[in-house]
Amino acid sequence: MALRKLFFILWVFIGGFAFAANTAPAEAGEKYNPVPFIMHHIQDSHSWHLWGEGHHSVGFSLPVILWDGGLKVFSSSKFGHDENEVAEVDGNYYKLFHNKVYKTDASGTIHEHDGHPTNEAPLDFSITKVVAQMILAALILLVLGFATAASYKKSNVPSGVAKFIEPIVVFVRDDIALQNIGSLRYKKYVPYLVTLFLFIWVLNILGLFPGAANTTGNIAFTFVLALFTMIVVNFSGRKTYWSHMFDPLGNNMPWGGKILVYLILVPVELLGIITKPFALMIRLFANMTAGHIIIMALISLIFIMKTYMITPVSLGLSLFIYVLEVLVAALQAYIFTMLTALFIGSAVEEPHHDH
């Protein structure tokens, strides 16, 4: 019974994606192009669009926050339902072009050179769809944290939400932090690793809802996560870590013979400071984006082939990928957290003494 309920819920989600897919129906005789729909789904936006088109669209506006000779705050509804209108704020005119805000004239003219806008772009601190979902995920984690703390104030035996959170914390502590960092220094990194795991996992799950933002499929978001890891790893680096970086061969051979080798090894070791977090950034971004694109492409088959006879096949395959994405949501959170712990472990590793 529980399994049937799960599949029913997943089917409703996939149906929601399919309902949202027809945001730009093709004209009679015109071939449907799924690329705009797919890109619309995976890209960030200044408004939270759920489904529909034009004045029949369902969603809500988000605050636009600009610095243009002063702070400018207004609703994204000023850009219109299709985000093609010109917004007038304090005598200045702004328009969205490829999801970026540019200053224009009253008619909304965008000047381009080699395909790139040459209009002035104010500093944009807006609460976009991705940022709003990050805030939502943070609030969810805060509620879970306070609820768990309240449970332990009543009793040392976990109850309610604590029954769900405690196994996750113990898993990250014992199977990720302890195993990769070591028993001497793992404890102070557990809060960071638990927060990292839960934050990525919650965002991955939220991204599977129809109309939600693909936050972990945003390269800027994964870049910041990878940057945090790089900072933690390198500020935690002990003498052994940095000596291996600049003297990878140690005392195994005289300096005269090491110079030529070091001209290659040292730059490679220093490059590893960037390439390790870069790999984290690309892995999470690529895996979460690929899953969304595959689901959207499978749903688009209904409109490409212009027949509902393909619907069972399209939705069936989409449901299969969707179930995999539920598993991938936890898997990618685990991989990012585990590799972060592994990099920290290599930075705080104690020197090995040969007898």
Image (spheres, rainbow, N blue to C red):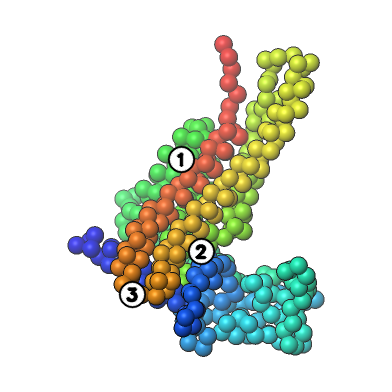
| Quadrant occupied by the N terminus | bottom left
* Residue 227 in view: yes
The structure residue drawn at horizontal position 53% and vertical position 62%, both measured from the top left corner, is: 215
Q: Mark 2 points at which residue?
A: 214
227 left or right, relative to 137: right
Residue 181 or 308: which is nearer the viewer? 308
**Residue that extends furthest to the left in the rendered view of this protein:** 1
Q: Earlier in the sequence, mark 2 or mark 1?
A: 1
The structure residue drawn at horizontal position 80% and vertical position 76%, both measured from the top left corner, is: 69
Q: Secondary structure beneath disc 1?
A: helix
Numbered disc in front, either 2 or 1: 2
Circle 2: is it few (<14), some (14-19), or many (20+) Cα within 10 Å?
many
* Image coords of residue 83 (percent x, y): 61, 81
Q: Name the residue under label 3.
A: 308
The structure residue drawn at horizontal position 61% and vertical position 54%, both measured from the top left corner, is: 223
* Alpha-carbon span between mark 1 and mark 3: 47 Å
Q: Quadrant of residue 272?
A: top right
Give the amino acid type for the residue marked by disc 3 in the picture.
Answer: Tyr
* Alpha-carbon span between mark 2 and mark 1: 26 Å
Circle 3: is it few (<14), some (14-19), or many (20+) Cα within 10 Å?
few
Q: Quadrant of residue 67?
A: bottom right
103 left or right, relative to 139: right
Circle number at residue 176 = 1
